[in-house]
Amino acid sequence: MITKRQKILDAALLLFSQQGLEGTSTGQIAKTAGVAKATLFHHFENKSLLIDELFRELKIELFSTLVQHTEIAEQNRYQAFKFMWMTGIEWALENPVAMKFFTNVHFDPTTQTREVIVSQMFASLDDIILKGQEAGELMVLDINLVRHFIHSHFLICANWLVDQQEPQPEQSEKYINDSFDMCWRAIGGQNL
């Protein structure tokens, strides 16, 4: 049985992805979830906290998928990062509504909560980048700048793929590989 809290999160995800964060009211979320507005506020003090919690839960789901399929220690940095990228794109294609939500959140003012979530969950990516910088394989840039660039590039590429109407598999595969190589080169990677 789905809890009221989960119904609220599911309704929020659907509405935020369709109408944007500002275009969605707590009243609409409660109505779509089939709960009273007071129930929504029992679980989430305000809309901002609801957004942060939905963001956290979806990032945990994405991160769990990435680490479940990645053995970074056994691969070179390029291959490890590429595998994370490919796995992330696959997750995005399987979760298009979540990707629309992530895009909407990305262009909303970031909260400290979301910053902490991203930096904690994606520490393994930071580790790949920092070790690559130390080894001279990547440009030495501020890790926060690199993380934001990678995240932005990923969102644009994933959403473009999600929006395609039945793309040819060969074209999608080439686009995914090219989008990763563009990202790798942009942070100073040379080995392709």
Image: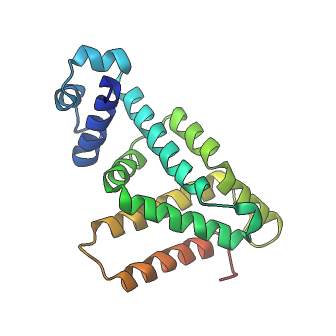
Residue 191 vertical placement versus 30 (above, below): below
| Residue at horizontal 29 percent and vertical 21 percent from the top | 40
User: Which of the pair 169/101 is nearer the observer?
Assistant: 169
Horizontally, is 66 left or right of 23 in the view? right
Horizontally, is 53 left or right of 125 in the view? left
The percent position of residue 81, horizontal first and vertical second, equals 63, 66
Note whether residue 110 is visible: no
User: Which of the pair 25/164 is nearer the observer?
Assistant: 164
Note whether residue 102 is visible: yes
**Which quadrant of the figure contains the C terminus?**
bottom right
The percent position of residue 134, horizontal first and vertical second, equals 82, 64
| Residue at horizontal 74 percent and vertical 71 percent from the top | 76
| Residue at horizontal 23 percent and vertical 41 percent from the top | 15
Q: Residue furthest bottom?
A: 170
Q: Residue furthest right?
A: 135
Query: Based on the displayed image, in which of its 4 quarters is residue 184 positioned?
Result: bottom right
The percent position of residue 117, horizontal first and vertical second, equals 56, 39
Query: Based on the displayed image, in which of its 4 quarters is residue 121 positioned?
Result: top right
| Residue at horizontal 23 percent and vertical 36 percent from the top | 24
